[in-house]
Amino acid sequence: MDISRKRVGEKAVRAARKARKHVAIRRLPRHQGDPLIVFEVGCQRSGTTMLGEVINRSLDTWVYFEHDRRAFRDFRLRTAEVDRLARWPGRPVAVLKSIVDSQWTDRFLDRHPRSKAIWIYRGYADVARSAIAKWGGHQRRLIDGVRRRQLAELGWRGERLADHVVATIDRLHRPDLSVQEGAALFWWMRNSIVWDRGLADDERVLVVRYEDLVTDPTRYFERVFRFLGVSFDPAFVTDTTPSSARGQPLDHVHPDITSLCDTMQHRLDGAYERSLARVPLRSAVPA
């Protein structure tokens, strides 16, 4: 099966699931009280869609994906509508896949007292390969834009960039920067938000690692659902597979950029371990 046909098939499956869920929740009593608002954030191509789709399989949740015009405009969260959007489905938990607004997560959490966030991260080599397959050299050109201080023209990508991020890109940028290096630096830039916005040790934020979610989905997704305060069913993850978690090194990357990304990966793993200590795995998940 070619990629285009596979994608059409996946879209059809998602549409069918969405329709069935619409029917199912109409038969349920509406949740009384304010729902929990959850912001799903992270770097693009890190598994945010997979995470949102699994969460959305519960009848206690409603996930707004970034193509949903009720919640997003040009993929940007309609921030003035968040409370109304959260109440509309009548479910205990409303999730907003606000990845292009990840740099505003701290503000969102402060603005909505009954809210949490999930930051998902994935190894930079796999993210870079996925981004190149989808967008070609686009992220390399974005890094060029940061180097030229064209932050306003970059839109959300140039918002709230810390001085140290811009300085690091200045230091590592070269006229012959490869597409792979551009994608790796973009991964580093977006994941820097975890520290630049104080999310790493915020108890309102659950840090999750893509590779664990797809290699042992029952144990690691149970943790996600427990953080959301809703019941987990192992049937939610029966089609979650580790096929996209390769972990192979990235070619055509200068050692200084590799070192930068390896250090970020180590810091993310440390934040993840601390998050696991706050919301630990269960030794056994009921079938």
Image (cartoon, rainbow, N blue to C red):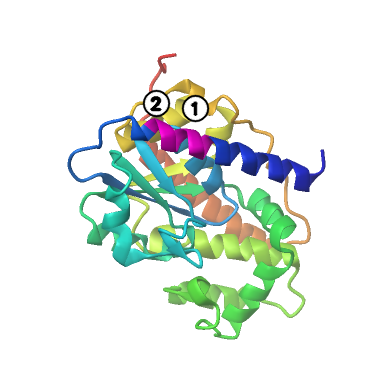
Name the residue beneath numbered marker 1. Answer: 236
Name the residue beneath numbered marker 2. Answer: 232
Q: Is residue 15 visible?
A: yes
Q: Is residue 18 magenta?
A: yes
Residue occupying the point 60% across, 28% down: 239
SS type, badge 1: helix
Amino acid beneath label 1: Phe
Residue occupying the point 24% across, 60% down: 110
Residue 86, given in percent of the width and then of the height, sits at 30, 50
Quarter of the image that includes the N terminus: top right
Residue 48, given in percent of the width and then of the height, sits at 52, 48
Residue 258, given in percent of the width and then of the height, sits at 66, 58
Find the distance from the CA under tag 2 to the CA under tag 1.
8 Å
Judge by depth and name the residue closer to the eye, 244 or 253. Answer: 244
Residue occupying the point 56% across, 56% down: 44
Task: From this view, report whether residue 198 is shown above or below residue 31.
Answer: below
Badge 2: how crowded within 10 Å, few (<14), some, or many (20+)?
Answer: many
Is the stretch drawn in magenta largely helix, strand or loop? helix
Q: Is residue 279 visible?
A: no
Magenta residues, start to end: 17-24
SS type, badge 2: loop
User: Hey, which residue is sitting farthest top in the picture?
Assistant: 287
Position of 10 with respect to 95 (left or right) is right
Residue 11 position by quadrant: top right
Judge by depth and name the residue closer to the eye, 260 or 197. Answer: 197
Residue 41, given in percent of the width and then of the height, sits at 44, 54
Quarter of the image that includes the C terminus: top left
